[in-house]
Amino acid sequence: MGEVLVVVDLTGGQAQTGQSLAGSPVTGLPKVADQLLTLAAGLGEPVLALLGRCCGGPGAVPAAILEAAARFGTTRVYLADAPELDEYLVVPKASVLTDLIRRIEPVAVLLPATQEGREIAGRLAVRLDSGLLTDVVDVQRDPAGDGFVATQLVLAGSTTVRSTVTRGVPLLAVTPNAVEPRPLAEPVAVAPVELLEYRQTPADSMVRVTGRTPSVGGSRPDLAEAAVVVTGGRGVGGSEPFAVVEQLADLLGGAVGATRAAADAGHYPHEYQIGQTGKTVAPQLYVALGVSGAIQHRAGMQTSKVIVAVNKDPEAPIFSLADFGVVGDLHTVVPAAIEAIRGRA
Amino acid sequence: MKIVVLVKQVPDSGLERRLGVDQTIDRDTADNVVNEMDEYALEEALRIQEGSGAEVVLVTVGPAGALATVRKALQLGGDRAVHVVDDAIAGSCVLGTSAVLAAAIASERPDLVICGAISTDGGVQVMPHMIAERLGVAAVTGARKIEIRDREVLVERQTEQGSEHLAAELPAVVSVWDTINTPRYPSFKGIMAAKKKPVVTLTLADLGIDPATVGFTGASTRVVDHERRSSSRSGTIIVDDGQGGQRLADYLAANKFV
């Protein structure tokens, strides 16, 4: 069994606050780490590369993270926390990983299919002349040979594709929340940590990060990783009325999303837009409030595990996607639901 | 200053899209359009052109039918276009596609390449970094604001956590989201002018690319099979009769979301 390298990026604000916004109760890492380690354990021996400073301080990985990684069978942990990883866009991370991959020769590399995960994977693909697959929701060993077969969801989730990598080390960008995390029955011994030396290449410092602005409402989970998303559409009717969307999201511990119509109307910031030209999410629960369900939007959420919709219009296309729907005024239904939920607690 | 705008022809995502028997996206029978995000890229190039002057060149890699898309894009703006078309390109993986795009861009020697951050067919979002890696230039991706100052490009990058401010020297590849601007509609004048704008066709041979390194032959990944999924669900839909909120709460509780 070969080693499967799982890459988890801690830069960009999460590590600095010592708080993982979508923190896993198991590893303390972003939840997607549990998902990637689970997939890796099915393909070989998981080894974990952490990029960026952990909340344990420079060169350190907190014991809690190591113990949790051991529950998924992780046999080695690599840490790259040179300041350059934060100071320049993407490329230093690709450089550190290129060196590591050439040295340890894993049988596959798993990264999250986030914006930056894809970009790192793209750089690795060129540097290592290796095949890259994105939007991977599962990987299994190929019964017919040595390699792996990856399942991808493509064309806005309308089509499942099974693919293999035919050259180089398979680089697989995995959709967050597509894999159910499964710790082993027995954890392995806690892995040793190797601090990776950072060796700068000329391309690394081409793009300087001169500032970062976290989004407002930063205490909610990232849309890309949230297990619950509550989205408001044009039917919410304005920016102040969006408060009810936020209330439900907070009650469910979820992230807030907006449709393009709502964002274009200025009711909610564009960075929360879900859809063809916004983010694609696949949470455990997607609640669509005042959302018509036009194709533009559906493309961004139709593979969610459970879809719930509230809309005044009984003909709204969203209802054909929903597992549960209420035809009614969301400004009546949702406050009543919130009260009922609080009443249960 | 010379700006290259990458334009991709994609099947209209508002209509049914499918993979063919060769496991690639069907472009022959589809209704093909300009990739939506590329409209924002072109608009941004035109704004820079209007502000400080520049030559704007559209570059497309696609089958012969992609010419119609290039002509459509030229109606919005741009001085001329380059269309790379070669049967051997079909079936390319991202390594092959990025190699062809990089070569086409290199032949133009632009100061700036602007492209959409995502295509609605592949949706892979890796081209800007792969092209930049091949050309040895900066990739500044995910822009919702671009400023050119002397030989520097300053970008506000949209991220899942908020935003980042980035600075890089030209030449650079910059990708944009739809939050960056509002694309113009073609004017009658633009539509007429587009017909006369030069479109040069290039083959792999013109770019010095060995066909064996791209297309199905040169691909580093292979699709084994595919299956269409139905997105319809037959869920429970109720009408609010005063109990809608309670029923919603019950459903969430029954499914362990609260």
Image: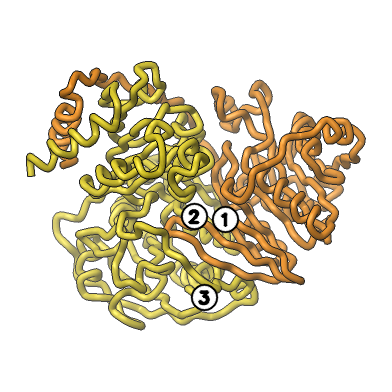
Chain colours: A yellow, B orange
* First along the sequence among labels 2 and 3: 3
> Within 10 angstroms of label 1, few (less than 14), some, or many (20 or more) residues?
many
- In this figure, what is the number of numbered marks? 3
| Tag 2 residue | A115
What subunit carries mark 3? A
How far from the left and from the top, in percent, is residue B186?
Answer: 76, 34
The residue depicted at 40 percent of the width and 63 percent of the height is: A7
Identify the residue at image location x=34%, y=36%.
A304
Residue beneath disc 1 = B142
User: Looking at this view, is A153 or A297 the one in front?
Assistant: A297
Can you tell which mark lies on residue A217? Answer: none
Choose mark 1 or mark 2, whichever is in front: 1
* Cα–Cα span, label 2 and label 3: 17 Å
Contact between marks 1 and 2 (CB within 8 A): the answer is yes
In this rendering, would A52 be left or right of B74?
left
The span from disc 1 to disc 2 (Cα, nearest Å) is: 8 Å
Quadrant of the snapshot with the C terminus of chain B: top left
Report the residue marked by disc 3.
Answer: A87
User: Is residue B227 shown above or below A152?
Assistant: above
